[in-house]
Image (cartoon, rainbow, N blue to C red):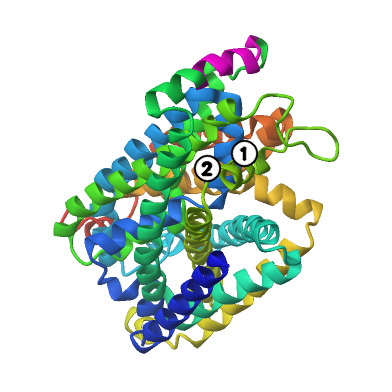
Amino acid sequence: MISVILLVLFFTLMTGIGIWGMGRTKTLGDFFLGGRTMGPWISAIAYGTSYFSAVLFIGFAGKQGWLFGLNALWIALGNSLIGAMGAWLVLAKRTRTMTQNLDTMTMPEFLQERYGAQHLKPLAAAIIFFFLLPYSASVFKGLGHLFEAVFHIPYDVALLLMIGFTGIYLVLGGYFAIAMTDLIQGAVMFIGAIAMVLVVYSKEGGLLTTLRHIFENYTAHIPPQSRPSVITILSVVFMTSFGPWALPQMVQKFYAIKDEVMIKRATVVTTIFSAVIGFSAYLVGVSSHVFFNPNTLPKTAKGAINFDSIVPILLTQLLPELLLAIILLLVLSASMSTLSSLVLVSSSSVAIDLYPGRVAAESKKDRSIAMMRFLSALFVIISYFISKYQFDVIVTLMSLSWGAVAGSFGAAFIYGLFWKGATKAGAYGAMLSGLITEIVLFYILGPAQSPLAASLAMLLPFGILPLISTFTKKPDKNVLDRAYKGL
């Protein structure tokens, strides 16, 4: 009953923020970037809440916690130091400055304007559309199953509720509504994550005692030949920590910062937030070695370990009703924030990047946001059908999404920010080599080695781009002067 009450209050608040945000959203720039007026706290929490979703709390924490043991904490460390702090320190200032200099609002627009490449934008937009939309649907699917288990309502009804309320505040208020709800959701996540760890670890005598038992039990539960190699651990850390540097829904947060002075404060806030959320999730995941053994782990119908059920079962057994309700809101908050960012970026790939014709900069700013609202709603509806009907091709796209997008954009985006010698041909080469490498290695190595495939797909373009740029036509000096002004 407590869960239902908190859920109703949560959804009511989200809807109210959407209506409030609608009054502040007048232009396309307002809808997509909040008018570039976001302060440090809002920007930092928006980045953190978009970083973590139900995939971390339900799937990743359960699977890596059991298979990796305490080595899973390296993932949390990498996420906070590289994925959060490193991204803000290295990318935030240049991204904000150059996107303003070039008058761009999206990753595809930035790549086109920075490299002077007419066809780079539609290529980048197509990659976003085909890989991020299925990814957003996979998060909806996970949430639907979670609510089905907790509230005992049909999966289809749970899915409609999740998609409906996410769509309401996103379509009405755009990025401003997302950022404001992220602030509230971030507070729920921060408090809930700490409380979750304190309660779980108190059941076994405290933090140090529980960690000792985890280490001892891991060696008994996982035989040496089944433990992950150093390469496997490093590839997961690299994929989840460096990947966000090139994901459009993450980079977008840098575009919207009010001014450069706020970047230092936002960096501190994001780092602390990410560390708390990441370590909390994996600390609960690795505690499965205290509360389960190989014989009591939840299994699928085929007898395999059901990693997605480990954390939900553990929390249901250990947490009091009120805290369990808060944790449910924690997972919901993380997922709704990630989902709204994904849908916003996916819809922008059509409304902004693939819109017929290249309008002048001034008229673009005043373009009606009706199309963006319509497409956001349409993409939410598409996500529902993708979540409901899991076609084989869609499942494959979900598995490929992180590596395909980060591999395609990483080198072209980062070299574009820092190296004037990066050429148009080099950018094309980097994007295509990253995408092709991810797809080929995914099928050669198999889904179990997808982190390694994604890591290699991210790394290879960093060698391809400078190699091609060395032998191809240099960028236009006027474009470079405009892009790098003030840097």
Residue type at mark 2: give it: Gly
The mark nearer the N terminus, 1 or 2, is: 2
217 is within the stretch colored magenta: yes
**Direction from residue 473 to residue 4 in the image, left or right:** right
Q: In this view, does 422 lie above or below 363?
A: above
Q: Which mark is residue 416?
A: none
Say which of 275 and 453 sits in front: 275
Say which of 312 and 198 sits in front: 198
For image coordinates 70% across by 28% down, the residue present is: 445
Q: Percent x, y for residue 425?
A: 47, 47
For image coordinates 66% across by 74% down, the residue present is: 381
54 is within the stretch colored magenta: no
Say which of 7 and 303 sits in front: 7
Q: Percent x, y for residue 141?
A: 67, 58
Question: Marks 1 and 2, Cα distance to the nearest angstrom?
Answer: 7 Å
The quarter of the displayed image where residue 450 is located: top right
For image coordinates 52% across by 17% down, the residue present is: 230
Q: Which mark is residue 438?
A: 1
Q: Which residue lies furthest to the top in this view?
A: 224
**Direction from residue 133 to residue 17 in the image, left or right:** left
Q: Main secondary structure of the magenta part?
A: helix
Q: How crowded is mark 1: few (under 14 residues within 10 Å), some or many (20 or more)?
A: many
- Secondary structure beneath dot 2 equals helix
Q: Do the residues labelled 1 and 2 touch (CB within 8 Å)?
A: yes
For image coordinates 25% across by 60% down, the residue present is: 41
Question: Which portion, as a residue range, is magenta?
Answer: 214-224
**Direction from residue 449 to residue 188 in the image, left or right:** left
Q: Residue 407 carries which label?
A: 2
**Quadrant for the N terminus in the image:** bottom right
Residue 221 visible, this orientation: yes
Residue type at mark 1: give it: Glu
